[in-house]
Amino acid sequence: MLRYVLGRFWQSLVLLLIVSFIGFTVLSLAPGGPLSQFALSPGMTQEQLDKIATQMGLNRPLPVQYFDWLSHLVTGDWGRSYRDGQPVLTIIGQHLFATLILMGTSTVLAVAFGTTIGIVSALRRRSVFDYTMTVFAMIALSIPTFWFGLVAIYFFSLKLGWFPAGNMFTVGDGSLLDYVRHLVLPAMVLALVDVAVWSRYMRTATLNVVNQDFIRTARAKGLSRTRILFRHIVGNALVPMVTLAGLQLPALLGGALVTETVFTWPGMGRLFLDSLGYSDYPVVMGLLMTSAILVLIGNLAADLIVAAIDPRIRLE
């Protein structure tokens, strides 16, 4: 197990290097480059832009700039924002918690509803419930997330007035209930597509387990349906779903970017779009690296959990 973890650690470092180099190169070669924000200042001359480029080291070869940025990154210096001069790590830390809360809540909802729907659909194969959930999944996977968000705001906020239309809390009201009311709509919208994905995968995984010989043996022994369901069917069907949870992290982060924008949720997704709009490249690179680290950690955790759940799997 230790050997496997160390191997994955080194693989993760290589992947982070590749991601960082590609991201740094793309941003540096983008139209306007890192100096585009400074060029918007009134009265800025080309001579002043050249002076800023020299001070920031932007006139050096791209590989030199990259390795200089990387050397500062590994020491904890992720640079400073072009907008307000704050450290990048400080800015990301101010928005990371909001994104983790949103992603965590939506994941819990997706797992709870998705696995339940998938199991019931598999046990009641070709029933009205199964066909209905299949249609629901196809609709959820076909319609963009931002559309669901706008529809949710229209009905539940503007028409019914049940939930706030956006933001994370009401100014002047720091109660837990207020936070929960603001969290409901974006978490539900973000979880909707994942519920569809989880239900389809869980249905397939459950059907594969139900047809196994050990399930027929358990029935022949006279075990109760409840024990067979929870001890043998669900336990074995969840093994591939844990791996799916790790693979879904990139999609979840992408969905969070859209959802946070629609609901003006102060998380990393909204910060990413704002930073791109302002050409705040140090913050963009910091968010890119943070997202890559979260995805790699999530995939490693999923592998370790699978090994713990299923004793037949040995990570060497």
Image (cartoon, rainbow, N blue to C red):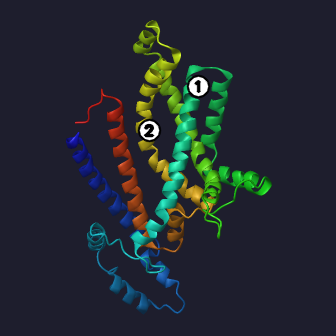
Q: Earlier in the sequence, mark 2 or mark 1?
A: 1
* Pick the front one: 95 or 126: 95
Mark 2 nearby-residue class (10 Å; few <14, some 14–19, many ≥20): some
How far across and down, in percent of the image, does residue 105 sit? 54, 49
Indicate the quadrant where residue 14 lies.
Answer: bottom left
Q: Amino acid at mark 2?
A: Leu
What is the CA distance from the residue labelled 2 to the residue labelled 1?
A: 19 Å
Lateral position of residue 312 relative to residue 266, left or right: left
Q: Is residue 194 visible?
A: no
* Pick the front one: 163 or 247: 163
Q: Is residue 137 visible?
A: yes
* Pick the front one: 231 or 128: 231
Q: Identify the residue at the far right of this view.
A: 159
Q: Which residue is mark 2?
A: 244
Q: Which residue is mark 1?
A: 120
Q: Identify the residue at the far left of this view.
A: 3
How far across and down, in percent of the image, does residue 48 sit? 42, 91
Which numbered circle lies on residue 72?
none
Lateral position of residue 301 relative to residue 268, left or right: left
Q: Does dot 1 land on a helix, a strand or a loop?
A: helix
Mark 1 nearby-residue class (10 Å; few <14, some 14–19, many ≥20): some
Q: Amino acid at mark 1?
A: Val
Q: Does dot 2 land on a helix, a strand or a loop?
A: helix
